[in-house]
Image (cartoon, rainbow, N blue to C red):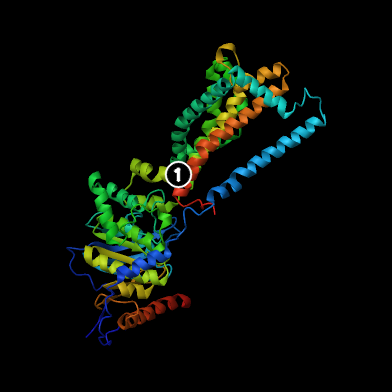
Amino acid sequence: MALALDTPDGGSGTAATASAVRLDHVSKSFGRPGRQQLVLDDISLDVAPGEFVTLIGASGCGKSTLLNLVAGLDAASAGTITVPGGRPALMFQEHALFPWLTAGRNIELALRLRGLPKAERRPEAERLLSLVRLQGSYDKRVHELSGGMRQRVALARALAQDSRLLLMDEPFAALDAITRDVLHEELTRIWSETGVSVLFVTHNVREAVRLAQRVILLSSRPGRVVHEWQVAIDQPRRIEDAEVSALSVAITERLREEIRRHGQQ
Amino acid sequence: MASSDLTTTPPSSPSSDLAGLEAGLDALETPTAPDHEPGRVWRVLLTKVVPPIVAIALVLIVWQLVYLAEVQPHYLLPGPADVWGEVNEMWREGTLLEYIWTSTSRGILGFLVAVAVGTPLGLLVARVKLVRAAIGPILTGLQSLPSIAWVPAAIIWFGLTNGTIYAVVLLGAVPSIANGIVAGVDQIPPLYLRAGRMLGARGFTSVRHVLLPAALPGYLAGLKQGWAFSWRSLMAAELIVHSPDLGTGLGQLMENYRTLQNMSGVLATIILILIVGVAIDLLIFSPLERRVLRGRGLLARAS
């Protein structure tokens, strides 16, 4: 039985109707006209509702730029980005929690900015905290929490936006291996409980395979979609599972090929 | 190239005890610091209270020795006891608190008005590029201008009135408060603003929920400095501006002592001015600053 399916480049261009986010021939360059540097070149991809997609690539592939474009923090130079569900939620590598608020108040601020009536905010914040298993941490200050706990509060705050699309920019990169492993499990659980679509950027191939239903490999300078893999391994997975390793090896091989290409130029 | 040739292995057992594992991690990684170790009061007393007392005592001793050695005649350099006698006399006459209150109330009122003017001004300079280019350098320049330089101009404008005193206080304190909030806004990590935008904070909401709280530590430092400038400017103004219907503040009191050639009185007033300045800082600004910084984990607990 095939656990991972190889699909040719851009092979997912099927139903244009329902997608959580859709990028059509998106390019992005930086710099003054005349001396522009192309960072993203003709990227087309879409994430289906409820789908978990990871983007991987070496340095300079424009992964974070791509997320910024989808998040609306920056504008594309060409092409269109459609996010039918409205403003997506974004989780950063740093927790980006506000240190002047408690964990619970951070979440309540997101709820308030979303327009939730005052009376409903506290119970909703408590519910989100227990979703990330931090019930009882409502009154904790950010600096009183460990790195893993901070990222869980940040996840709860992102979920508080009640967006149909969650963008994650290497959110676990700064955590130790044990904590990261636990957070992978948490994220998988929360993703299947909430049905939110996730576009997850990482440079960690195993993490990408561990989490995603589909892994998209970007080339570097400029970023282009090189290849994508369907990950048909059943959840719950573990990062040390043989299938995860095998597919990771294959993807890493392809990634190295891409990187070598730069040395030859 | 993908792993289509893999054989199925049974999925690894779902970790049923994820919650327990996570609770263990959280417990291990949360710092455990006993809040009240025994003898904490004594240590605070020893490290925080005793050193300044010793320093003051040393200064008094040296002063007394110089006085006894008669380096200068006693009417030029009175001893600590003479100065204390002067303060004591004001106390017995019931005028001491009146002098202090006249100055302190002026200082506080002037400071509050300076906050009301300096805060929006600082926000404008921090957030609007054109305003910053236009008046940013002037604001910084004004901060280094001694406020006593405003006194002659203020007297010409307002005469010997409270207006002159407040004008000098404002011109002294507004720039440092405005610069404080500019520094506070400039030091905000851009990540907070991006995070705020992602949560949907725009315009005024962003200023209220992200910008202002994030700038608070720098702003508080500006307020503290603003108070110091208010108090200094007030003393400069009071030294020069006095008329019978203005009431006697500490600055005017010192000028009165000078005309009487009463050196003990002059020294006593200087010490009173110092005490008021330090007391306001110790009672209001320092605790406020400590509370804000500690709440954000920016201040290590005394250990």
Is the N terminus of chain A in the top left, top right, bottom left or bottom right quadrant? Answer: bottom left
Q: Nearer the viewer, residue B230 or B121?
A: B230
Where residue A212 sits in the image (x, y, percent)? 29, 72
The residue that appears at 45% across and 60% down in the rendered structure is B32
Dividing the picture into quadrants, the one containing residue A36 is bottom left
For disc 1, the marked residue is B215
Residue B20 higher or lower than B57, as above or below = below
Dividing the picture into quadrants, the one containing residue A213 is bottom left
Where residue B122 sits in the image (x, y, percent)? 47, 37
Using residue B229 as the reference point, say whether residue A91 is left or right of it: left
- Can residue A226 be spotted in the picture? no
Which amino acid lies under the numbered mark 1 shown in the image of this protein? Ala
Using residue A196 as the reference point, say whether residue B62 is left or right of it: right
Crowd tier of the residue under label 1, counting other residues whose Cα lies within 10 Å: few below 14, some 14–19, many 20 or above: many
The residue that appears at 46% across and 44% down in the rendered structure is B291
Chain identifier of the residue bearing label 1 in the image: B
The residue that appears at 71% across and 16% down in the rendered structure is B260
Q: Which of B257 and A99 is in front in this view?
A: B257
Where residue B34 sits in the image (x, y, percent)? 47, 56
Dividing the picture into quadrants, the one containing residue A162 is bottom left
Using residue B200 as the reference point, say whether residue B186 is left or right of it: right
Q: Which of B9 and B102 is in front in this view?
A: B102
The residue that appears at 60% across and 48% down in the rendered structure is B47
